[in-house]
Amino acid sequence: MIYWSISAVGVKPAIRKAGKDRWQRLSTHALLALGILTATLFIPTSQWFQAEHMYAEHSRAMGLVGLAMVMPGIGFAVWARIHLGRNWGMPMARKAEPELVTSGPYALTRHPIYTGILLAMLGTAISESVVWLILLMVFGTYFFFSARREEEFMVQQFPDQYPTYKQRTNMFLPYLL
């Protein structure tokens, strides 16, 4: 989160619209903030969400499997964010001098930040608590619909390039989905 906040400084400016778009952005920010607060404050402190409570026998192997998913998931999301550089912004924000990024992690999947976060959440569910699957389903649903809307927006911004890019890459999982 610290990296994300610091790296947001210096991105290309967004071209803002008044009215409905402003309320959409505010509601998106509120939903994301609520999800992050829930994930970071409530779940780790509640005994109902602890692995010892959820699993009859929580094994070290499950913890290692989960960790083996969390670390690459976070790494993939951060790599995608770094690769976007100044092109990063809130979903569907119109940028000054937009560029279509299709290299690096974006050559593997169209939404590597979402993919990385979902992989990390699945790893957390495996290593910590199955209740994380609830958050995974909520965020997964949000990411799917958000990705669909973003792709409609990208087709408008890059009508010649994006359809070709969309045909050669998968939405979330490289080579699968």
Image (cartoon, grey):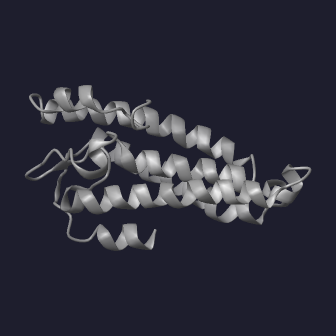
Question: Residue 16 at what x, y percent from top left?
Answer: 19, 50
Q: Residue 154: x percent and y percent?
A: 21, 35
Q: Residue at x 16, y 30 (%)?
A: 156
* Number of numbered labels in the structure image: 0
Q: Position of residue 167 (x, y in %)?
A: 25, 25
Rendered location of residue 107, percent (x, y): 26, 43
Q: Nearer the viewer, residue 40 or 25?
A: 40
Residue 40 lies in quadrant:
bottom right
Q: Is residue 177 above or below residue 85?
A: above
Q: Is residue 128 visible?
A: no
Q: Nearer the viewer, residue 161 or 64?
A: 64
Q: Locate residue 158 relative to residue 154 in the image: left or right.
A: left
Q: For the C terminus, which image quadrant?
A: top left
Residue in the image at 26% along x and 59% along y: 83
> In the rendered view, does 108 fall on the left or right side of 36?
left
Q: Residue at x 42, y 37 (%)?
A: 172
Residue in the foreground of this view, choosing between 114 and 69: 69
Residue 73 vertical position relative to residue 171 in the rendered view, above or below: below
Q: Residue 75 falls in which quadrant of the image? A: bottom left
Q: Residue at x 49, y 54 (%)?
A: 73
Can residue 122 be seen in the rendering of this structure?
Answer: yes
- State the residue lying farthest toward the front: 61
